[in-house]
Image (cartoon, helix red, strand yellow):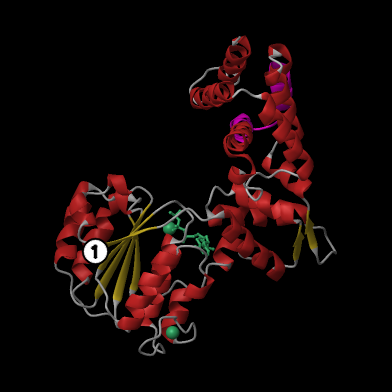
């Protein structure tokens, strides 16, 4: 079985990391200058590189070939190889999501004072650290207050607001950013090349757009689409934008444009029936509403700032479609447009608890078309 992309392409050195420049710079400086702290806290959205950078940091710390002033791990010594293969004894990964981590934190406290087996440091990566139970948090706090010199802690979390302040204040904090589209596109392009996948530029953009800033999700979509498009006895895999639309259940922009036209003309029944038709054809309604909101957002930005606020890289539109968007932007009155976006945003929230999935949308359309 071949490995999934997000494992296969987990960066093995700092140079492969995309984005997070401020974090990479501070950490590599710390490594090079040997000015280390014993507690680090990585917070930020999923799939943005927290676990990846934590492991790289651990690898560089324990690399046997790293010279003073360097920061990259060699990926050749036994310590680096053990970490790459997930079998390093002195890198201890704790998942706080399982039972609040109490058993593992207890184990940690029992073992932490023994020197590392083979390496210079014992590195503890505590994932999902916001899920540590109260008991586990308190136990960890005591250790963080007075760790032995050979211990380094890296806590990772997507929800820092759930962590106790005393733990946060014991750590050096790094705020990871959602990855930007051009960065995601660039690295997906590299991976595609390595995998012998020929992919249209617009398809890459669509993947990046659908990833929501999580590179893991971007890689998974690419992976899935490649499997979907692979043909027996053919070495090269070709991915077209339409393949992706099918696979992701993305509604064609043409339909969105048409719905917006109906709304502009206040044609309630036509707009609702086009909605229902799309739904019946198997579109994911939440996703569909997301796309409409995204499209309306582009109209709004164009209305407010013209070409200046319009980002061709993130709109996912062809030139033809963008021309149409401009026409629609001119037809909308700005307050109406704002009203419409708010209605859709509300509908989207209400859809989550509505007994009839499409009802909040139908109400939003009817209400909008009822405006004089
Ligand atoms: N900044 C990045 N540069 C390069 N690859 C990345 C980056 N962020 C994530 N990836 C890719 O995505 C995968 C998942 O990343 P990682 O496990 O580091 O995310 P995370 O921030 O820990 O997410 P989670 O909060 O879900 O645990 C990695 O294996 C890697 O392939
Ligand atoms: Mg992680
Ligand atoms: Zn090494």
**Residue 29: which quarter of the image?**
bottom left
Which span of residues is magenta-colored? 272-291
Q: In this view, does 88 lie to the left or right of 295?
A: left
- Quadrant of the image where one finds ligand 3: bottom left
10 Å crowding of disc 1: few (<14), some (14-19), many (20+): few
Is 254 located above or below residue 270 in the figure?
below
Q: Is residue 68 left or right of residue 366?
A: left
> Which residue is labeled 1 in the image?
107
Is 229 located above or below residue 161 in the figure?
below
User: Is the residue marked 1 within 8 Å of ligand 2, measured from its CB?
Assistant: no
Residue located 63% across and 63% down the image: 186
Residue located 57% across and 60% down the image: 183
For the stretch drawn in magenta, the main secondary structure is helix
Q: In which quarter of the image is the N terminus?
A: bottom right
Q: Where is residue 238 drawn, in percent x and y?
A: 79, 58
**Residue 253: which quarter of the image?**
top right
Residue located 72% across and 43% down the image: 245
Q: Quadrant of the C terminus?
A: top right
* Disc 1, SS: helix
Residue 277 within the magenta-colored segment of the rendering: yes
């Amino acid at each position: 079985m071949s490995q999934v992309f997000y494992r296969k392409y987990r960066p093995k050195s700092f140079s492969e990391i995309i984005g997070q420049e401020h974090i990479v710079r501070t950490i590599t400086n710390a490594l090079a200058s040997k000015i280390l702290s014993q507690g680090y806290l990585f917070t930020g959205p999923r799939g943005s590189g927290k676990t990846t950078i934590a492991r790289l940091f651990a690898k560089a710390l324990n690399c046997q070939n790293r010279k003073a002033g360097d920061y990259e791990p060699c990926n050749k010594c036994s310590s680096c190889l053990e970490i790459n293969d997930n079998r390093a004894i002195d890198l201890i990964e704790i998942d706080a999501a399982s039972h609040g981590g109490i058993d593992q934190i207890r184990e940690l406290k029992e073992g932490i004072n023994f020197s590392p087996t083979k390496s210079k440091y014992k590195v503890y990566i505590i994932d999902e650290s916001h899920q540590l139970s109260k008991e586990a948090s308190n136990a960890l706090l005591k250790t963080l207050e007075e760790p032995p010199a050979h211990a380094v802690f890296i806590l990772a979390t997507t929800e820092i607001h759930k962590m106790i302040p005393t733990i946060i204040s014991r750590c050096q904090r790094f705020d990871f950013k959602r990855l930007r589209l051009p960065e995601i596109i660039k690295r997906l392009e590299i991976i595609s090349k390595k995998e012998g996948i020929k992919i249209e530029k617009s398809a890459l953009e669509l993947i990046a757009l659908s990833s929501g800033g999580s590179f893991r999700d971007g890689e998974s979509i690419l992976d899935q689409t490649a499997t979907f498009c692979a043909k027996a006895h053919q070495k090269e895999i070709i991915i077209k934008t339409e393949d992706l639309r099918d696979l992701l259940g993305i509604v064609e922009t043409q339909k969105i444009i048409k719905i917006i036209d109906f709304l502009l003309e206040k044609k309630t029944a036509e707009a609702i029936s086009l909605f229902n038709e799309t739904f019946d054809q198997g579109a994911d309604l939440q996703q569909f509403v997301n796309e409409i909101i995204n499209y309306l957002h582009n109209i709004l930005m164009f209305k407010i700032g013209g070409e200046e606020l319009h980002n061709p890289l993130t709109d996912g539109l062809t030139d033809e479609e963008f021309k149409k968007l401009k026409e629609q932007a001119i037809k909308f009155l700005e307050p109406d447009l704002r009203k419409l976006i708010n209605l859709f945003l509300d509908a989207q929230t209400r859809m989550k608890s509505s007994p009839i999935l499409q009802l909040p949308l139908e109400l939003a359309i009817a209400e909008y078309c009822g405006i004089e």
